[in-house]
Amino acid sequence: MVVNLKSLTQSENLEGNLFLLVSVSVLLPFYVGSAVIFLTTLYLLFQHRRDLRQIMRKQSWLFIFLIYSLIISIYFRNYIGVAVTFVLFLLFLLFNFYFQIITPQLFLKQIKIFTWGSIPLALLAFVRYTYYVFMNGYDLFYIFKYHNPQIRAEATFFNPNYYGLYIAMVLVMAIYLMAKTKRPLDRWLSMIVIFLNLISLFLTASRWSIPTCIVGIVLMVFFLKPKIAWGIGFALAGGFLTLFIKPELLPRFTTLAHAFDDRFAIWYTGWQIFITSPLIGRGPMAYVTFYYLFADQGKMHAHQLLIDTLANYGIVGLMVLTMAFSHYFRNVVERVFQPKIRLELGLIVSILVIVLFHGTMDVGIFWIQTGYILLSILVVPFCVLEQLENEV
């Protein structure tokens, strides 16, 4: 019996280390993280193959959604959607295994990897930016001076907007770690993270990432110190008024009207794709697959989370997704003011609001790097969150 327990512990340690490896890999270029995620999922699937039926039974609504997505994609000959459904199935399995083995210590280690791992990414972004501006005869304020900058920070992410979403999540996680830990080194590292990522945020020149970061920070501070959050909120309202008068204070804000015109055109195309199949959608990546029906230029998605979801899965698919996640959101709402896990729920709620707020203008969460980070924070049993109270 002792041998079995020892073997079980060794197996859990190995699987926990695998998830730490995956967490590091998603901060590298997406093809590296994708390969590591694929191999890790195959290994865990082999190790837990006997649990597969039980997993599908426990997560029946999500499994139904994946089958639905596959059928719709095949029906509309959306072969990109078929491939995406396969990827979603792998993530479905991976995070079911994650849910089974996650511990308070593993959770905190992953948060630190995502947060402190942003330091080399910010440095990389800054080095690339400075190299470009100096090689082309500009100065360090190039990003503020030109309406259409040719260099924007994206680090190892797909584009500056996706990197901006990551920065928003990192800033919230850094505040969480500062409030959570009592170690001076941890707090100093978190402050360095905040400083460097604020610089990177401006270098992304991502118009919507800046207000997204503000919303996330204010909400996280509200869970820690509500009175301070209100003060920050009023100060930021004054900042927005100033920005309205002088939009040149932030990169690319002088062309905001043009950006909205562009977004409206993309949304219109996404909505038209939805209208062609409003009940069942056309499968994942419907925009990039069927844009030619209504527009001359393709995009990866509809740049709006709700429109993109409707175009992909229709009203029926959206209802199935709602059923799949309703229990989780109900548990969050019931515990949102529970003092014991207030800090952890502040992190979860802030990250969720960041994703939804950013999703009004983009679909950056539908990407292997940002998606993995989001799920690593959300897919944690509430009993583990309660145990985090004693972790520093």
Image (cartoon, rainbow, N blue to C red):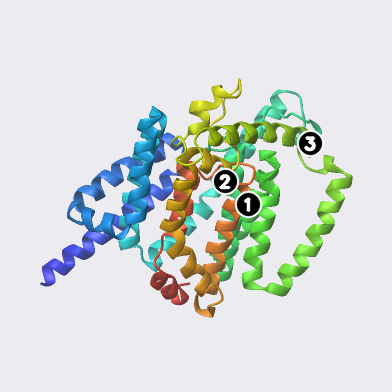
Which residue is painted at 57% across and 29% down in the image? 299
The amino acid marked with disc number 3 is Ala
Percent position of residue 315, x then y? 49, 46
Q: Nearer the viewer, mark 2 or mark 1?
A: 2
Q: Residue furthest right?
A: 245
- Vertical position of residue 347 compared to residue 157: above or below: below
Amino acid beneath label 1 = Phe
Provide residue 7's location: percent of width, then percent of height. Answer: 17, 63
How far is the residue under mark 1 from the one under mark 3? 19 Å
In the picture of the structure, the residue carrying the numbered disc 2 is: 306
Instruction: Report, in whole angstroms, how far the alpha carbon at label 3 lies from the one at label 2.
Output: 22 Å
Q: Secondary structure at mark 3?
A: helix
- Report if the CB atoms under discs 1 and 3 are less than 8 Å apart: no
Quarter of the picture holding the N terminus: bottom left
Residue 257 location (% of width, % of height): 79, 36
Q: Badge 1: few (under 14), some or many (20 or more) residues near its Cα, within 10 Å?
A: many
**Nearer-the-camera pick, 61 or 378:** 61
Q: Nearer the viewer, residue 296 or 50?
A: 296
Q: Earlier in the sequence, mark 1 or mark 3?
A: 3
Question: Circle 1 sits on which residue?
Answer: 357
- Residue under label 3: 257
